[in-house]
């Protein structure tokens, strides 16, 4: 996500102001501090992963999370998520093109094929015009490049969805998605690259220019797996919360700051961040971290395949997790709205999960079974 000096052409495409605009404020003149205030009001919030859910290309028939109906990280997918009142925000990935425009795309590389020859380019090495030439086109007369996706096992598959939409910029997302829908802007960087601080700073300032110009009063927060990017974005602005993304110990990295949920909490304490977004298995394996986070006034959100299982989300609700990022947006948002009703009372979690509360869908015996099942679930690949 390293970004060179932005040429005039990119500025014309993105219409980014030459100077950072004044940060948005509420009617009372105070900067927004969401989602933290929103978390306090709702108890547990639901975020749509890349909109209405990621596209699990290559998923076997009958898989719980398959190729979503809408292409992920598009205006179509974000708009569909906004139609669900129980969805507080959508999570999406932002990278900066070579000519300095923040765009929405998850993978580090984008792939296409022509006459059986595979072409693979790093997103941040593309000009905006090149990036937008992939996939379905906004203007029908333009010739598009078919999109393919490389899987973790190395396979390259056609990236098809039931309903397609064109690739978009961060500016377009602000302009076309309901202003009532919150944004979780993941600042995307390649895990295999060591970025000089000046490159991180330049990329993040480019993103902030768009945010300050177009965000208005929209609730939003930043997140990133890159600890130095988290520190810098926190130093560059004090308007929007910054959360640190972690795999919670489910993967190992050379950077020790990324190797456990406890390490992530320490990063938040050192860099004055607002919370942690952990892979859900990291939280289920280390529930005491929730107490530690609360003692440091940090929010705890989770992501991962288990968040598409209603029972696993309910366990997190009882534990005091503040929010879940999910692929099965409609199903899980409805479930959370159900078991978050006021009659359940306040979620409490001290030294153990509070099993005393009752809910019509889960008896105490069933919840006991779920707690015994969780250790088995978190050992399975997802």
Image (cartoon, grey):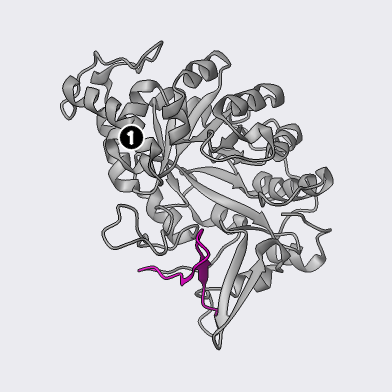
Establish if 173 lies above or below 112: above
Q: Is residue 232 magenta?
A: no
Establish if 157 lies above or below 178: below
- Identified at 50% across, 81% down, the residue is 140
Quadrant location of residue 27?
top right
Quadrant location of residue 350?
top left
Q: Is residue 213 left or right of residue 90?
A: right
Q: Is residue 316 left or right of residue 250?
A: left
Q: Is residue 161 magenta?
A: yes
Q: Nearer the viewer, residue 372 or 302?
A: 372
- Identified at 72% across, 65% down, the residue is 125
Q: Is residue 279 left or right of residue 206?
A: left
User: Which residue in the protein does label 1 denote?
Assistant: 376
Main SS category, magenta section: loop
Q: Nearer the viewer, residue 28 or 381?
A: 381
Name the residue at the top extreme: 351
Q: Percent position (x, y) of residue 282?
A: 48, 32
Q: Is residue 142 visible?
A: no
Q: Quadrant of the N terminus?
A: bottom right
Magenta span: 142-163
Q: Percent position (x, y) of residue 332?
A: 31, 41
Q: Percent position (x, y) of residue 133?
A: 60, 75
SS class, disc 1? helix
């Amino acid at each position: 996500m390293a970004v060179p000096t932005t040429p005039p052409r990119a500025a014309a495409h993105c219409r980014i102001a030459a100077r950072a605009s004044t940060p948005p404020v509420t009617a009372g003149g105070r900067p927004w501090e969401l989602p933290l205030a929103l978390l306090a009001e709702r108890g547990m919030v639901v975020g749509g992963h890349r909109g209405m859910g990621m596209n699990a290309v290559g998923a076997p028939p009958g898989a719980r999370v398959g190729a979503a109906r809408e292409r992920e990280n598009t205006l179509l997918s974000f708009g569909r998520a906004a139609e669900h009142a129980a969805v507080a925000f959508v999570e999406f990935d932002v990278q900066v093109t070579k000519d300095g425009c923040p765009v929405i795309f998850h993978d580090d590389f984008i792939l296409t094929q022509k006459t059986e020859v595979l072409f693979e380019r790093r997103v941040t090495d593309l000009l905006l015009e090149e990036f937008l030439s992939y996939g379905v086109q906004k203007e029908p007369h333009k010739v598009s490049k078919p999109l393919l996706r490389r899987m973790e096992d190395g396979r390259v598959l056609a990236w098809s969805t039931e309903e397609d939409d064109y690739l978009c910029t961060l500016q377009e997302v602000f302009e076309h998605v309901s202003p009532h829908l919150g944004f979780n802007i993941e600042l995307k960087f390649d895990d295999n690259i060591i970025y000089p601080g000046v490159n991180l700073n330049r990329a993040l300032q480019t993103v902030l220019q768009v945010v300050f110009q177009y965000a208005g009063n929209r609730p939003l927060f930043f997140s990133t797996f890159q600890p130095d990017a988290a520190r810098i974005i926190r130093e560059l602005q004090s308007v929007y919360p910054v959360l640190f993304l972690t795999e919670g110990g489910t993967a190992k990295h050379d950077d020790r700051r990324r190797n456990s949920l406890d390490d992530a909490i320490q990063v938040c304490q050192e860099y004055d961040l607002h919370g942690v977004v952990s892979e859900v298995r990291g939280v289920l394996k280390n529930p005491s971290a929730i107490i530690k986070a609360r003692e440091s006034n940090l929010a705890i959100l989770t992501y991962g395949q288990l968040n598409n299982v209603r029972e696993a989300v309910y366990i997190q609700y009882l534990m005091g997790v503040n929010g879940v990022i999910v692929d099965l947006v409609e199903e899980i948002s409805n479930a959370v709205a159900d078991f978050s009703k006021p009659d359940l009372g306040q979620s409490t979690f001290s030294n153990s999960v509070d099993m005393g509360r009752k809910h019509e869908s889960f008896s105490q015996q069933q919840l006991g079974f779920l707690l015994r099942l969780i250790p088995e679930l978190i050992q399975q690949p997802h």
